[in-house]
Amino acid sequence: MIIVLKDGIGKDKIKSFSDELSRDYGVKVNTWFGTHSTVLGLIGDTQSVDIERVQANDIVDTVKRVQEPYKKANRKFHPDDTVIEVAGRKIGGGNIAIIAGPCSVENRDQICGIAERVKAAGASFLRGGAFKPRTSPYSFQGLRAEGIELLLEAKKQTGLPIVTEIMSINHIDLFADVDIIQVGARNMQNFELLKALGATGKPILLKRGLANTIEETLMSAEYIMSAGNEKVILCERGVRTFEDYTRNTLDISAVPVFKRLSHLPVIVDPSHASGIDWLVEPLSLSAVAAGADGLIIEVHNDPPHALSDGAQSVTPDAFDVIAKKVFHLKKALADL
Ligand code: PEP
Ligand code: MN
């Protein structure tokens, strides 16, 4: 349920009204202060809330029941875009953030060399998998803890904050110095992991599951947020369809839909969505045109010899061109 208050109500009055609602109905009250209005979001079992009584209060403008099962992630509860700031870089609210780097961290020279190149091209974060979810147990599984150490070295060398995927709740301590923790598609509904990440307070990059709906994705964000961490970035990375020319099918409409339903930042992963290097550029541009707040792109110095996902990895030279076009398109759209 959301309660929109009348303009110009003092903070003390708002606080005592919220306390009264929590006490009388046993609900949690989220307060969002906008420039013109204040919105109270009631979370919990709101069945017993007497709408007419609430409406009769002279500080209340309107009261509406919210049908969607996600509350904290819901734009109705938080009309402005959420902007997440990480090491001075902004994600959300119309800024374009590019996260780039290899699928897997392979060795020091590889990760540090790629980090230098993507930084020079305008990326604001370095990605690299240390714990890798692979379909086959015989495929390269990642350098694990050593991979995180190497990412931290690349961060020290370049100043780029790092993004890497967590696969198990048992590894959370290893991620203490990671700037953004990625939850991969395969773990989007690992609810215990989501709850534990909610307790870390770290920015979480939540990828949409292989065959999950938009609402299920928002419910996973809700798990992290309801556990106390509002810093969630949604990522559309393609879903399973009957089409097998591409690895997945990029659901481009998910971008404006997520942005309409939720205030959270939305980024797109054109690499896993397509599985093909030459599709990364057109999909990146489509994502920006559709309103994405950023991209996560796989870049490798030697794609044919990459230990994972070489076919979808672009070279640093190709990434230079993609980043240039992305920034150019973003600027052209902003200048309209
Ligand atoms: C990845 O980013 O390397 C990855 C495994 O992505 P996804 O979870 O989207 O498949
Ligand atoms: Mn990959």
Image (tube, rainbow, N blue to C red):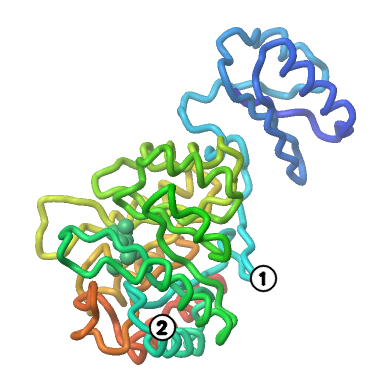
Residue 242 shown left or right of residue 87 in the figure: left
The residue singled out by tag 2 in the image is: 111
**Contact between labelled residues 2 and 1, with CB atoms less than 8 Å apart:** no
Q: Which numbered circle lies on residue 88?
A: 1
Depicted 310 relative to depicted 77: above or below? below
Is 131 located above or below residue 18 in the figure?
A: below
Q: Is mark 1 within 8 Å of ligand 1?
A: no
**Residue 17 seen in render:** yes
Q: Position of residue 223 (x, y in %)?
A: 48, 37
Total tally of numbered discs in the picture: 2
Which residue sits at x=47%, y=67%?
163
What's the residue at 35%, 55% (across, down)?
Answer: 184
Q: CA distance from mark 1 to mark 2?
A: 22 Å
Kindly identify the amino acid type of the residue bearing the numbered disc 1.
Answer: Gly
Residue at image position (21%, 57%) is 249
Q: Quadrant of the C terminus?
A: bottom right
**Callout 1: 10 Å neighbours few (<14), some, many (20+)?**
few
Tell me the SS state at disc 2. Answer: helix
Where's ligand 1: which quadrant?
A: bottom left
